[in-house]
Amino acid sequence: GDSVTQMEGPVTLSEEACLTINCTYTATGYPSLFWYVQYPGEGLQLLLKATKADDKGSNKGFEATYRKETTSFHLEKGSVQVSDSAVYFCALTPNPSNFGNEKLTFGTGTRLTIIP
Amino acid sequence: KAGVTQTPRYLIKTRGQQVTLSCSPISGHRSVSWYQQTPGQGLQFLFEYFSETQRNKGNFPGRFSGRQFSNSRSEMNVSTLELGDSALYLCASSSGLDETQYFGPGTRLLVL
């Protein structure tokens, strides 16, 4: 079945440092890929997504590129802020042409803490 | 446009009781999915409804059930609660036009 493997945390960085959170996946066909963020006591917020190979999703300074050849979707940010402290989840849904199968498969999450 | 809303936000029950959680999707969204989040198992898919029909179901016992109404609002029910059912239950909606799901704030259930 589909699976997502995510970089183990926790990750602690100083403000303005560069961030990379690794994510690789196993799936048949061409899944859609997502990064969600969860702040303390809240639900999940969609951070960015990519639906086909070589697509780059971006939002709030975060970026991730859909790499079919390495089955990866690593999250990057050039300069993190204290407000970026949260838990980040990589996720996929199956081939979008399989309409009706929108189940999200999540990684285990990576807790990120940014120190001033 | 208002986001996904879930009620109640917090709930405390005792073993053996049953509970019903409610989810109102984003206006116009016809698909509603439910997920369970626990520290040990992470985020796990429960089921998905589209136009009042269950389209997908995760690997949970029959004590977990759901339904969707004609206005797309959804409820999930857990009967005969167990301590292990303590979790954050998240609802997500999508338009059905693409696969992007938008999540509500969740209902935190504590079973004593």
Image (tube, coloured by chain):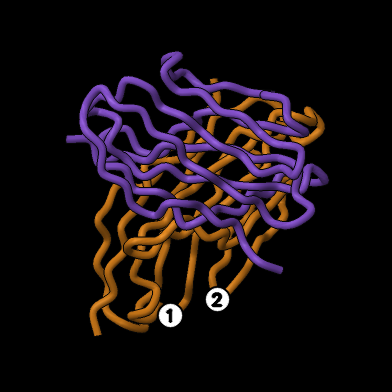
Chain colours: A orange, B purple
The numbered mark at residue A52 is none
Dot 2 amino acid type = Gly
Q: Is residue A17 above or below residue A24?
A: below
| Relative side of B80 to A21, left or right | left
As drawn, which residue projects farthest toward the left? B112
Q: Is residue B36 above or below residue B62?
A: below
Q: Are marks 1 and 2 on the same chain?
A: yes
* Circles 1, 2 touching at the beta carbon (< 8 Å): yes
| Tag 1 secondary structure | loop
| Image quarter hosting the C terminus of chain A | bottom left
The image quadrant of residue B27 is bottom right
| Relative side of A55 to A42, left or right | right
Point out residue B73 in the picture as x, y percentages from the top left corner.
65, 44
| Relative side of A115 to B61, left or right | left
Q: Report in which chain the residue with disc 2 lies.
A: A
As drawn, which residue projects farthest toward the front? B17
The image quadrant of residue A107 is top left
